[in-house]
Image (cartoon, grey):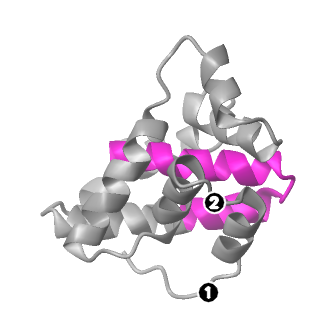
Amino acid sequence: GGAVKNVIAIACGVVAGRGLGENARAALITRGLAEIVRLGRALGARAETLMGLSGLGDLTLTCTSMQSRNYSLGRALGEGRPLAAIMDARRSVVEGVSSAGAVSALAARLGVEMPITTAVDAILNHDAAIEETIAALLARPYTVEAV
C-alpha cells in the first residue's frame, strides 16, 4: 500500500493544483483506497490491514498535507510547472514519481484495474496532457468502491 499511496497523493495534488476542489480530492482518496485494496488482495494482503492507520490513515495524510512530497509535487504539476523543473528544485526523493510506472506495470501484469495509478503514470512517464487525463479520470462513472 505504501508505494501506491504516494502515487494517489500525486493525483490528489494535481487536482488541488488545478483548483478542482475538495470533492474531487475526496473522490480520488476513496477510489485510491479501492485501488490499494485491489492490488493488495491480488498480492495476498488482507483488506482489513489496509483499512487501518497504516493504510487508510497514511493515505489520507499523504493526500492532504503540503508536508507530503508527493502531494506537493502533484500540486506543482497541477499548477502548470514542468516535472523536470519541480524535480530539479527538490533535494529529497519523491517516491511516487519512481513508483508510478512500476506499480502500473505490476497492476497490468496481475490484471488489476488501477485507473488513478495508470493516469499518474501516463502524466509522469508518457507525456499525457494533465488536463485531459485528469478530466477523463474524474469523469469515470460512479461505482460501489467495495473493499
Name of the residue lying farthest toward the left: 44
The residue sitting at 67% across, 33% down in the picture is 72
The residue sitting at 63% across, 88% down in the picture is 141
Q: Position of residue 118 (x, y in %)?
A: 47, 64
Mark 2: which secondary structure? loop
Q: Is residue 28 left or right of residue 112?
A: right
- Is residue 52 in view? no
Magenta segment boundaries in residue numbering: 1-30
- For residue 34, the mark is none
Mark 1: which secondary structure? loop
How crowded pointer 2 is (Cα within 10 Å; few <14, some 14-19, many 20+) is rated as some
Toward the viewer: 74 or 9?
Answer: 74
- Is residue 127 in view? yes
Q: Look at the numbered discs 1 and 2 and tell me whether their residues touch, using CB distance below 8 Å.
A: no
Q: Is residue 120 left or right of residue 106?
A: right
User: Is residue 57 placed above or below 88 in the rendered structure?
Assistant: below
Toward the viewer: 15 or 147?
Answer: 15
Looking at the image, is mark 1 or mark 2 nearer the viewer?
Answer: 2
The residue tagged 2 is 128
Q: Position of residue 93 (x, y in %)?
A: 47, 22
The residue tagged 1 is 142
